[in-house]
Every structure is written in structure tokens, then in C-alpha cells.
Image (cartoon, rainbow, N blue to C red):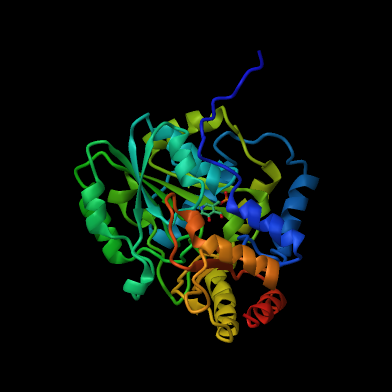
């Protein structure tokens, strides 16, 4: 008898990202589906990694991450958010933001725990909850047709969904795929809900620097009363346009981080040493991360300006790599159907927003990644104009 796997994730199949990328390659489409830059990252940072390798930093480093890098992160958290973070006890370097999220969820979730997660949601959240035997409680964001500021959290609905078994609320700001961000009132609402409860917060802040229009990033690190119950996850891949390096970190209070490290220790143990040496040095410069928002805003604005020649209608985006467009004025095809046709017939790949929901959802919205060279954006829009 052959062994048979009883799937821990029976509902998970090939993701739409893989499907659309394969389709894009097959039809030589311009790929605005995938969320990564097609331009060169900082040459200086590349050189720093090379230097670190040449200097012999090629062996395992500390399980919590290189001490110097953790110190620099703590200094940055203080400079940006006035947060008092102990680099010894409160920070762990991880191989990317997704890993930090998975580790945090695995650290706290017990079978049957409920986790509030807002949809559309980054695709790893729900499988990561389910693999831990916990129960996702998806709450749809208010669709911006009815909210001029973009997709918003319906806090009244959150209050109704909180139960005695709610273990965690997951947040993501700036948000993938909508580009919406948390505001001051969201923080107040969140506070009023979690106060006097044992609810944890997982805050996915991988796009913390990719924020536009002089908006302020509402990090959990700003609020000691929220930070005391939060795992806050970050990604160097997003901050420095090196998504393929898979490097990030998690910040949490010492007692929570102690448990996080137990899970991390026997999963990854420690991350790339030369990259950590390079990042520790590069983080000492503030400009690269402070200017990132303005640089990406120029890309968003350029893409929006080009797209005005098409029949697509933009939804507000204040951060991240992404811009959602409504195609309601073009066709009433289902999102996935239209995304496939767009790739095959017009040669531009985008991601249907419905891919970020558990249940059927069809607002006639596609996600485009605008973090591309101007020439790439121009070539894509020249194709979209034909529709
Ligand atoms: C919302 C969100 N969180 C986390 C990640 C993953 O970051 P990393 O590549 O560092 O794992 C992404 C990447 O697309 C994302 O969009």
C-alpha cells in the first residue's frame, strides 16, 4: 500500500499568480500582475553584499539575526515612530515578511481560535491560519464606490464578529491589493475593540515606506498600548526593491518574541549572513527609505496619467506596489475571465481582485503593479488603449 497524504490545505490549489504568470509568458504579455520591480535596485546595496562575502561573512549568524542589524532596526523604529524597541529581545530577522507572518501565526494560534482577517487579503493569510487549525473570520472591506477614501474597514461589523474565541486581528497597511491605509480613526476603533481583551494583533507593514500623498504610516510601533499585543512584520525586499532576497523581520514585546523564536529556531534558524551585514550598513542612511514613497508615487502618478487614455477607472491608492482599476465601463465579464482574455488578446497580465477573497466576489476590478520602468508602463498602456 502506498502512503497517501491527507492534505492540511485541501482548498489550496495553484494560485492565480502562478496561472497568470504562466499565461503571460505563453502569450508574451507585459506582466503587470506580479508585484515586483523590473528595474535595478540600489547598486550600493548590491556592492555591500559583495563586500560582506569577500570579507568572509559567509557562515551562520546569530539565530535572532545579526546583532548590529537588530540595533540599526531599533534605532530606525525610534527615529520613525518613537518606539522603544530592545534589539536583544524584541526583534528577529526572518527570511521575508511572509515567513514572519507564518511564524507569528504559528506561535500564537491553537486549534479552534478565531482570526479576524480583512478581505481582500494577501493570499498567505488564510492558509497560514488554517494550517494551524484555527478559523479565519473574513470581513470584507467596504468597497470604495461607497467610500471616497478607498477601501475601508467596517468597524461596526468587526465589533459584531468579535467573540470569546477571537484570538487575533490581522491588519495590513499599506494594503495589498487595494493600496488603502489605516488612519487615525481606525487606530481609535481598534483600540476600543481590543482594550480589556486578550486579543493579539498581527500587523503586516511590509509596505511601510511605500506610502504616498504625504500620508503618515500608522504603524503599531507608534502606539505602546497596541504594540504590547502586536507582532509587527516588515520586509527589506519591499523597502529596497530586492524582493528576491527574501529578507524581513518581526518586532514584538519580549515575552511574545521569546515564543516566536522557539518556532523560528527549528524552522529556519538563521538568515543570510552577508545580506544582514550589508543591510546593517545600508540602514544607517535614512535617505533611501525616506525617499522611497516619493519615488513610487511618481510611478503611480505616471501610470494613472497614462491610463486616463483607457476606459479603466482608478480606485484610490495611497500606498503599496498596486493600483486597482474598475473595468465596469468595458464589460460585465467575471474578473478572472476578463483577466485571462486581457492577457491572451491584448497582451497585458493583471490580477483579478476576486483572487484575494475566499468566497466568490466580483466587483469588476483588476490589480495592476505600477512598480515598473516607464517604458514597460507605456508599452502596457498602449495595448490597453485598444480596448
Ligand atoms: C501584504 C504583503 N505581505 C507580505 C508580503 C511578503 O513579503 P516578503 O516577500 O518579504 O515575504 C507581500 C508580498 O507581496 C505582501 O504583499
Residue 79, how many percent across, how many down? 44, 60
Q: Is residue 119 visible?
A: yes
Residue 164, how many percent across, how many down? 22, 37
Residue 38 falls in which quadrant of the image? bottom right
Residue shown at 66%/64% (left/top)? 37
Residue shown at 29%/61% (left/top)? 186
Residue shown at 40%/55% (left/top)? 119
Quadrant the C terminus occupies: bottom right
- From the viewer's perspective, tell me whether residue 319 is left or right of residue 26: left
Residue shown at 24%/45% (left/top)? 162
Residue 9, how many percent across, how many down? 51, 35
Q: Nearer the viewer, residue 321 or 231?
A: 321
The correct choice, above or below, for 70 with respect to 209 in the image is: above
Residue 249, how many percent across, how many down? 53, 46
Residue extending furthest toward the front? 332
- From the viewer's perspective, tell me whether residue 135 is left or right of residue 297: left
The correct choice, above or below, for 239 with respect to 55 in the image is: below
The correct choice, above or below, for 189 with respect to 383 in the image is: above
Q: Nearer the viewer, residue 366 or 315?
A: 366
Amino acid at each position: 500500500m502506498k502512503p497517501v497524504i491527507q492534505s492540511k490545505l485541501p482548498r489550496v490549489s495553484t494560485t492565480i499568480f502562478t496561472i497568470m504568470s504562466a499565461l503571460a509568458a505563453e502569450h508574451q504579455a507585459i506582466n503587470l500582475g506580479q508585484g515586483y520591480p523590473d528595474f535595478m535596485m540600489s547598486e550600493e546595496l548590491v556592492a555591500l553584499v559583495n563586500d560582506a562575502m569577500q570579507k568572509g561573512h559567509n557562515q551562520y549568524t546569530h539565530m535572532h539575526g545579526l546583532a548590529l542589524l537588530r540595533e540599526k532596526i531599533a534605532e530606525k523604529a525610534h527615529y520613525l515612530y518613537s518606539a522603544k524597541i530592545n534589539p536583544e529581545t524584541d526583534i528577529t530577522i526572518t527570511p521575508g515578511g511572509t515567513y514572519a507572518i507564518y511564524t507569528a501565526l504559528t506561535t500564537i494560534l491553537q486549534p479552534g481560535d478565531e482570526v479576524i482577517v480583512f478581505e481582500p487579503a494577501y493570499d498567505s493569510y488564510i492558509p497560514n491560519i488554517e494550517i494551524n487549525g484555527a478559523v479565519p473570520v473574513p470581513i470584507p472591506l467596504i468597497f470604495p464606490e461607497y467610500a471616497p477614501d478607498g477601501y475601508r474597514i467596517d468597524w461596526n461589523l468587526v465589533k459584531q464578529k468579535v467573540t470569546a474565541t477571537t484570538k487575533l486581528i490581522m491588519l495590513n497597511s499599506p494594503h495589498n491589493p487595494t493600496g488603502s491605509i489605516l488612519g487615525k480613526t481606525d487606530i481609535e476603533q481598534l483600540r476600543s475593540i481590543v482594550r480589556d481583551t486578550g486579543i493579539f494583533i498581527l500587523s503586516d507593514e511590509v509596505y511601510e515606506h511605500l506610502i504616498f500623498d504625504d500620508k503618515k504610516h500608522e504603524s503599531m510601533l507608534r502606539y505602546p498600548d497596541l504594540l504590547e499585543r502586536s507582532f509587527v512584520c516588515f520586509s527589506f525586499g519591499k523597502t529596497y526593491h530586492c524582493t528576491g532576497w527574501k529578507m524581513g523581520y518581526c518586532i514584538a514585546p519580549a515575552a511574545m518574541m521569546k515564543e516566536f523564536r522557539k518556532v523560528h529556531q527549528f524552522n529556519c534558524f538563521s538568515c543570510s549572513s552577508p545580506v544582514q551585514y550589508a543591510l546593517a550598513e545600508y540602514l544607517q542612511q535614512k535617505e533611501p527609505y525616506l525617499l522611497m514613497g516619493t519615488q513610487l508615487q511618481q510611478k503611480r502618478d505616471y501610470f494613472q496619467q497614462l491610463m486616463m487614455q483607457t476606459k479603466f477607472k482608478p480606485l484610490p491608492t495611497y500606498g503599496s506596489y498596486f493600483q486597482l482599476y474598475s473595468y465596469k465601463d468595458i464589460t460585465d465579464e467575471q474578473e478572472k475571465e476578463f483577466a485571462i482574455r486581457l492577457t491572451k488578446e491584448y497582451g497585458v497580465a493583471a490580477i483579478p481582485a476576486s483572487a484575494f477573497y475566499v468566497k466568490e466576489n466580483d466587483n469588476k476590478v483588476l490589480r495592476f503593479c505600477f512598480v515598473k520602468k516607464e517604458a514597460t508602463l507605456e508599452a502596457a498602456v498602449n495595448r490597453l488603449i485598444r480596448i
